[in-house]
Amino acid sequence: VSMHGKYKYLCNIIFTLGILGIFFAISLIVENILNAYSLIPAVFTLAIFLISLFTDGFFYGIMASLLSVLALNFAFTFPYFKFNFSIPENMISAVIMLVITIMSSTLAIKVKQQEKIKAETVHEKMRANLLRAVSHDLRTPLTTIYGSSSAMIEQYDCLSKEQLLQLAT
């Protein structure tokens, strides 16, 4: 893996963990200050969506989804600070979060691909315009050189030394 690839990988991991940490703190605030437990899954869903949107590929979104399900189960459901997946609501929540992650990651990847294609199209259009301009600018002098050379070759015996020098110049 190249240095750029390692850097991008590290940035994606730091971003994922940072967003999860921030949204975990927001969830604690929502639970303790607003007493609105029902909003916590939506808070984590937003975090997963942001991670899927701003990281590369499915991996980070799916990992964030799994970590969010674990955090939700561990810190925000009874019995607190213990994992309990025997409750059907927890399993349904996990499945919903995974589906949202896959869908948002797919959409984010498609948007990124379309942006890349658009950038490549613009680049190709600029390249074609540059080639047309250079081609046009070179065509006139090359036509003159070709005409002079043809005249020198075809009329070599009929031209004076001065005329040959003038055509060569």
Image: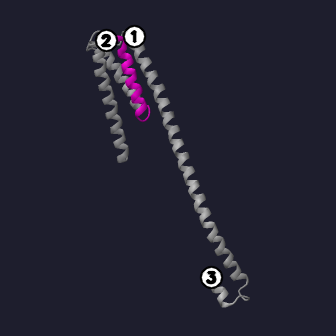
Q: In the rendered image, which residue does mark 3 sit on?
A: 168
Q: Quadrant of residue 141?
A: bottom right
Q: Quadrant of the N terminus?
A: top left
Label annotation for residue 77: 2
Marks 3/2 in contact by CB < 8 Å: the verdict is: no
Q: For the residues carrying marks 3 and 2, which lies nearer the camera in this image? A: 3
Q: Where is residue 14 in the image (x, y as percent from the top left)?
A: 31, 34
Residue 96, above or below 113: above
Residue 77, above or below 3: above
Marks 1/2 in contact by CB < 8 Å: the verdict is: yes
Compared across the picture, whether 50 is left or right of 138 comes to left
Q: Quadrant of residue 96?
A: top left
Q: Residues within 10 Å of mark 1 (few under 14, many from 20)?
A: few
Q: Quadrant of the C terminus?
A: bottom right
Secondary structure of the residue carrying numbered label 2: loop
Residue 9, above or below 151: above
Exactly how many numbered labels are in the figure? Answer: 3
Marks 1/3 in contact by CB < 8 Å: the verdict is: no
Q: How far apart are marks 1 and 2 (CA)?
A: 10 Å
Q: For the residues carrying marks 1 and 3, which lies nearer the camera in this image? A: 3
116 drawn magenta = no
Q: Nearer the viewer, residue 106 or 146?
A: 146
Please provide the residue range marked out in magenta: 34-58
Compared across the picture, whether 139 is left or right of 127 comes to right
Task: Tell me the amino acid under the disc marked 1.
Answer: Glu
Q: How far apart are marks 3 and 2 (CA)?
A: 91 Å
Residue in view at x 71 percent, y 80 percent: 151
